[in-house]
């Protein structure tokens, strides 16, 4: 069905548009309330059309975090659920601030309840832990439950800001011990709040397949009436339109630092022009996150329109890749940001006339 899979250093994608961790839960709804765990907009987009769908970050044991593990709720409980959401997710300024705290059912339950139901998807399994031993245990479970080629990759989330842990102290040990155990390609999710260039170099040293840049930016908002934090956890991860310039900067700086691993870029993407901007900065693929999947409650009524826009975005990115292959095929060793890539070929400033050639 997908004869032209894209191979990014062993990470096989159906196209260059993937989805970010958490926004689509485990890739399928649990019960009648689509709102819970899976963006309502997802019902208007065939998820198999994405290059890959990334799961919510999974831990060894079920974890409530700053939210709840209850997945089936009666309609009468909807108000209480929305209040719970408001303490874990808030729309702020030009983005979203969240602190779910890795709320998830645990990796064993995922493989038992959701993995068989999402076989039509190309999946990236996101995992998180607080030690190298936990990451090794997570890799062991994925190895046992998923055959080589049955998933696109494992994503190591060693950079979450809302679980209150200094991940920079364990990154190298995690990569040194856990990566070599994996039967699947491994991606490292980078934080703009840590030394992401140093972490990317560790990823190269320990044989990872690629990078995901960027995770959310640590943020804080206070209620202007009371001075109390908006979120239960006080601090949260900022995502959405507000962080796009940071994401583009990080991707560009990784390439300028000589990092050659494939980069899946994420942060504030909502249009084809956003995707192209990340490609020019040096990304190999893009990931759609909160800017696409979240909306004010009334905004979900526009779900069918949002679905059409997402499908059109995927088609345009696919056509964009095709045009590049027709105009100037990339060499086997070419990386975005160097000779043979979009960033390397196009001028720093592209005027209206030139833009027409790349739309």
Image: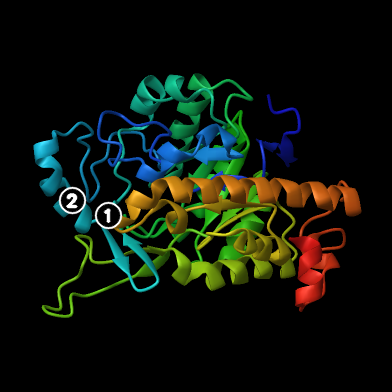
Q: Is residue 336 above or below residue 245?
A: above
Q: Is residue 342 above or below residue 157?
A: below
> Which part of the image, by quadrant, shows the C terminus?
bottom right
Q: Which label number is shown at residue 82? A: 2
**Which residue is pictured at 46% across the width and 50% down the height?**
305
Would residue 328 be visible to someone looking at this image?
no
- Label 1 neighbour load within 10 Å: few <14, some 14-19, many 20+: few
> Which part of the image, by quadrant, shows the N terminus?
top right
Residue 78: x and y, percent? Answer: 14, 43
Quarter-wise, where is residue 133 in the image? Answer: top left
Mark nearer the N terminus (1 vs 2)? 2
Q: Is residue 285 above or below residue 229?
A: above
Q: Which residue is mark 1?
A: 297
Labels 1 & 2 near each other (Cβ < 8 A): yes
Q: Secondary structure at mark 1?
A: helix
Residue 181: x and y, percent? Answer: 58, 32
Separation of residues labelled 1 and 2 (CA atoms): 10 Å
**Colouring scheme, one of rainbow, by chain, secondary structure, one colour:** rainbow
Residue 188: x and y, percent? Answer: 56, 49
- Label 2 neighbour load within 10 Å: few <14, some 14-19, many 20+: few
Q: Which label number is shown at residue 309? A: none
Quarter-wise, where is residue 228 in the image? Answer: bottom left
Q: Is residue 102 above or below residue 1?
A: below
111 on left or right of 34:
right
**Which residue is pictured at 29% across the width and 51% down the height?**
100
Closer to the camera, 26 or 301? 301
Q: Secondary structure at mark 2?
A: helix
Residue 187: x and y, percent? Answer: 59, 45
Quarter-wise, where is residue 163 in the image? Answer: bottom left
**Which residue is pictured at 33% across the width and 50% down the height?**
301
Closer to the camera, 299 or 136? 299
């Amino acid at each position: 069905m997908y004869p032209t899979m894209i191979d990014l250093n062993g990470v096989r994608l159906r196209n260059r548009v993937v989805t970010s961790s958490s926004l689509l839960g485990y890739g399928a709804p649990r019960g009648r309330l689509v709102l819970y765990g899976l963006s309502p907009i997802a019902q208007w987009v065939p998820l198999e059309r994405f290059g890959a769908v990334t799961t919510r970050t999974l831990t060894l044991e079920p974890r409530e975090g700053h939210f709840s593990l209850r997945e089936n709720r009666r309609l009468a409980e909807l108000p209480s659920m929305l209040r719970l959401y408001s303490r874990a997710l808030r729309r702020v300024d030009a983005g979203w601030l969240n602190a779910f705290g890795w709320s998830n059912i645990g990796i064993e339950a995922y493989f038992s309840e959701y993995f068989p139901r999402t076989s039509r998807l190309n999946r990236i399994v996101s995992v998180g832990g607080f030690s190298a031993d936990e990451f090794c245990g997570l890799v062991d479970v994925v190895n046992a439950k998923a055959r080589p080629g049955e998933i696109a990759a494992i994503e190591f989330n060693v950079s979450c800001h809302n679980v209150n842990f200094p991940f920079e102290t364990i990154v190298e040990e995690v990569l040194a011990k856990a990566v070599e155990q994996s039967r699947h390609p491994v991606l490292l999710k980078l934080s703009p709040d840590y030394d992401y260039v140093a972490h990317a170099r560790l990823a190269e040293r320990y044989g990872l397949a690629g990078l995901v840049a960027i995770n959310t930016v640590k943020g804080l908002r206070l209620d202007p009436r009371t001075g109390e934090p908006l979120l239960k956890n006080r601090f949260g991860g900022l995502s959405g339109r507000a962080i796009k310039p940071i994401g583009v900067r990080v991707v560009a700086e990784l390439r300028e630092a000589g990092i050659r691993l494939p980069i899946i870029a994420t942060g504030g993407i909502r249009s084809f022009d956003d995707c192209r901007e990340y490609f020019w900065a040096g990304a190999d693929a893009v990931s759609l996150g909160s800017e696409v999947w979240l909306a004010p409650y009334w905004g979900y009524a526009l779900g069918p329109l949002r679905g059409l826009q997402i499908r059109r975005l995927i088609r345009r990115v696919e056509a964009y890749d095709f045009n590049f292959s027709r105009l100037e095929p990339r060499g086997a060793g070419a990386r975005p940001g160097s000779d043979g890539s979009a960033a390397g070929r196009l001028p720093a400033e592209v005027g209206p006339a030139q833009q027409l050639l790349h739309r």
